[in-house]
Amino acid sequence: MPAYLIVNIEIKDAEKIKKYLTSTPEILNKYSGRFLVRGGQIWVAEGNWNPKRVVVVEFDSFEKAKEFYDSEQYEPLKKLRQSSANTNMIIVNGITNEMSNKLNKK
């Protein structure tokens, strides 16, 4: 079942975070991570959420997403991100195609 890492990030130090932005894709790839959203235009349809930069990464599984987040390779980049940006991040299970088909038939 796919899983998604969903991030709202507000960059505080654009120069410092450049290494993070260029180095993270290679590590994501090792853990089956694929960017679905990486920045871009935001329109708030409802509520008072005011995201700054949204990132969505799809992984093959919840376990792969957690392995990425906890990996030795990501640890120095995680610290770099944490020192140069404010971040809210979650990992959430997606649904399988079979589950999606059942839900869409209702």
Image (tube, rainbow, N blue to C red):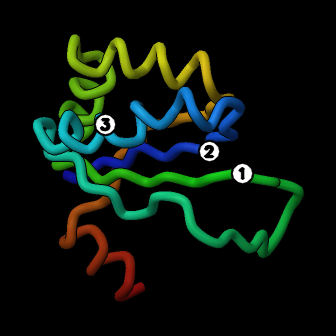
Category of crowding for the residue at label 3, using alpha-carbon neighbours closer than 10 angstroms: few (below 14), some (14–19), many (at least 20): some
- In contact (CB < 8 Å): disc 1 and disc 2: yes
Q: Nearer the viewer, residue 96 or 50?
A: 50
Question: Is the Cβ of the residue at disc 1 closer than 8 Å to that at disc 3?
Answer: no
- Residue visible at 82% across and 70% down in the picture: 46
Residue at (14, 45) in percent of width and height: 32
Please indicate whether residue 90 sits to the left or right of residue 72 in the image: right
Report the residue at 62% width, 34% height from top.
88
Q: Earlier in the sequence, mark 1 or mark 2?
A: 2
Helix, strand or loop under label 3: helix
Tell me where residue 13 sits by quadrant. Answer: top right
Q: Nearer the viewer, residue 43 or 79?
A: 79
Three-letter amino acid code at the position of disc 2: Asn
Q: Residue furthest bottom?
A: 105
Q: CA distance from mark 3 to mark 2?
A: 16 Å
Question: What's under tag 3, amino acid-wise?
Answer: Thr
Q: Is residue 80 left or right of residue 25?
A: right
Q: Position of residue 64 (x, y in %)?
A: 19, 34
Coordinates of residue 27 in the picture (x, y in percent): 20, 34
Q: Picture coordinates of residue 22 (x, y %)? A: 34, 41
Q: Which image quarter: residue 85?
A: top right
Expressed as whole percent of the image width and height from the top left, the position of residue 101 reads 27, 80
Cβ atoms under marks 3 and 2 closer than 8 Å? no
Which of the two discs, 3 and 2, sits closer to the camera? 3
Is disc 1 surrounded by few (<14), some (14 to 19) or many (20+) residues within 10 Å?
A: some
- Identify residue for label 1: 52
Would you say 12 lies left or right of 76 here? Answer: right
> Separation of disc 1 and disc 2 at Cα?
7 Å
Instruction: Quickly name the residue at label 3.
Output: 24
Q: Secondary structure at mark 2?
A: strand
SS for dot 1: loop
Q: In the rendered structure, find residue 8 and report the number of the disc placed on it.
A: 2
